[in-house]
Amino acid sequence: MPNQLDKQTPIHTLDWYVKWIASLILLFGMLLTANNVYPINLIFHLIGLCGWFFVALVWNDRALIIINAVSISILMNGLLRYVLECKNCFLGITNNVSI
């Protein structure tokens, strides 16, 4: 009997495509982080995490829902702080508020 792992999730469904695309986006975000490309790395991480959050909801997997929801919140906090602190940030928003 061959030693094979049985697939537990169906392939070529919407959640299958979203999880693979989100995974690739997360890996690209990690590459940007490793090369200190800030804050674009946060945006790629957020997009990937949102994809995985969608998959977690479709699968009704509470552990994935929690880890992705918390991760999205943490990265949104960092991105918001960047936007509020920058004078001429990449989004073209000029802000005079000091934190």
Image (spheres, grey):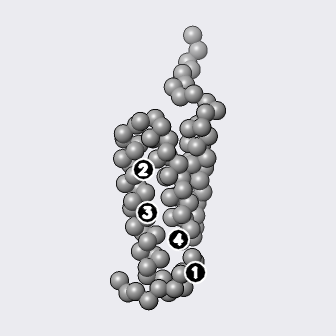
Q: Which residue is identified by label 2?
A: 68
Mark 1 or 4, closer to the camera: 1
Q: Label 3, secondary structure: give it.
A: helix
Q: In which quarter of the image is the C terminus?
A: bottom left
Marks 1 and 3 sit apart, C-alpha to C-alpha, by 20 Å
Marks 1 and 2 sit apart, C-alpha to C-alpha, by 28 Å
Mark 1 or 3, closer to the camera: 1
Q: Which residue is identified by label 1?
A: 92
Q: Which residue is identified by label 4?
A: 39
Marks 1 and 4 sit apart, C-alpha to C-alpha, by 14 Å
Q: Give yes or no for contact between labels 2 and 4 (Cβ–Cβ under 8 Å).
A: no
Kindly identify the amino acid type of the residue bearing the numbered disc 3: Leu
Q: Which residue is identified by label 3?
A: 75
- Residue 24 versus residue 96 in the image, above or below: above
- Percent coordinates x, y for residue 81 in the rendering: 41, 74
- Residue 24 versus residue 37 in the image, above or below: above
* Label 4 CA crowd tier, 10 Å (few <14, some 14–19, many 20+): some
Kindly identify the amino acid type of the residue bearing the numbered disc 4: Pro
Q: Label 4, secondary structure: give it.
A: loop
Kindly identify the amino acid type of the residue bearing the numbered disc 1: Gly
Q: Does label 1 or label 3 sit earlier along the sequence?
A: 3
- Percent coordinates x, y for residue 56 in the rendering: 45, 41
- Residue 4 versus residue 18 in the image, above or below: above
